Amino acid sequence: MAKRCDISGKGVMVGNQISMTRSRVSRRAKRTFKPNLKKVRIMDANGSVSTMKICVKELRSLKKSKQYTRVI
């Protein structure tokens, strides 16, 4: 199961976790940043219902733009 948004394509990113002791950086470790995905059923203009994995930022945009008739 891929951790990727079906609309924007936003996926897992890799970065550094920096641990700080007092006033200096002591070490860096690799970590992953995962998108905030929700499984949502969407009804489009034709009336067909489809299940998609969408990040919450795109879900807010869909509800505002009224691009889809109904987000279930």
Image: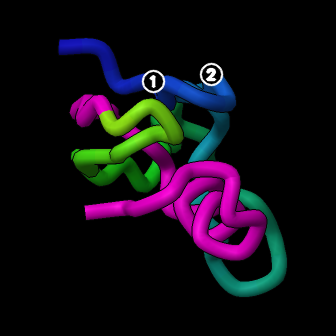
Which is nearer the eye, 21 or 2?
2
The secondary structure type at the circle numbered 1 is loop
The residue sitting at the bottom extreme is 22
Checking the image for residue 4, the label placed there is 1
Counting from the top left corner in percent of width and height, residue 34 is at 44, 42
User: Which amino acid is tagged 1?
Assistant: Arg
Q: Residue at 49% x, 49% y: name it.
A: 55
Q: Residues within 10 Å of mark 2 (few under 14, many from 20)?
A: few
Quarter of image, res 43: top left
The secondary structure type at the circle numbered 2 is loop
Q: Is residue 49 visible?
A: yes
Q: Are marks 1 and 2 in contact (CB under 8 Å)?
A: yes
Which is nearer the eye, 67 or 28?
67
Q: In which quadrant of the rendered image does the N terminus lie?
A: top left
Q: Residue at 27% x, 50% y: name it.
A: 40
User: Which amino acid is tagged 2?
Assistant: Gly
Extent of the magenta region = 48-72
Mark 1 or 2 closer to N-term? 1
